[in-house]
Amino acid sequence: MTNLITQIIRVHDVETGEIIDRKMDDFEFAEYEKDKKAVAKAQLEEEKKAMAKAALFDKLGITVEEAVLLLS
């Protein structure tokens, strides 16, 4: 399988100072894509939570700062 986007892995041996750049193999690329999707999903969930909180504060007619005061 050929990757449409070539991703590079950098290996840096701190003992020798040698730096090796190489292309990801298919397994590494699949894991990279899977991780990228998981991060995007987590970000979307966080955005949904933030929007729900903002809608609730608006519904209650209070600001975030006022909610913090109520919960402290």
Image: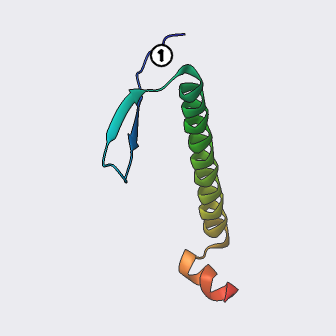
Question: Is 70 located above or below residue 13 in the figure?
Answer: below
The amino acid beneath tag 1 is Asn
Q: For the point 64% across and 49% down, which residue is it?
A: 45
- Is there any visible trace of residue 63 in the rendered image? no
According to the image, label 1 marks what residue?
3
Question: Is 26 located above or below residue 20 in the figure?
Answer: above
Left or right of 13 in this view: 54? right
Please name whichever residue, 63 or 18, is drawn nearer the observer in this view of the structure.
18
Taking the view exactly as shown, the residue that stands out farthest to the front is: 16
Q: For the point 33% across and 49% down, which residue is it?
A: 16
Please name whichever residue, 36 or 42, is drawn nearer the observer in this view of the structure.
36
Please name whichever residue, 50 or 20, is drawn nearer the observer in this view of the structure.
20
Please name whichever residue, 54 or 18, is drawn nearer the observer in this view of the structure.
18
Q: For the point 55% across and 20% down, which residue is it?
A: 26
Quarter occupied by the C terminus = bottom right
Left or right of 55 in this view: 23? left
Q: How crowded is mark 1: few (under 14 residues within 10 Å), some or many (20 or more)?
A: few
Would you identify the image quadrant in which residue 7 lies? Answer: top left
Q: Position of residue 49 (x, y in %)?
A: 65, 57
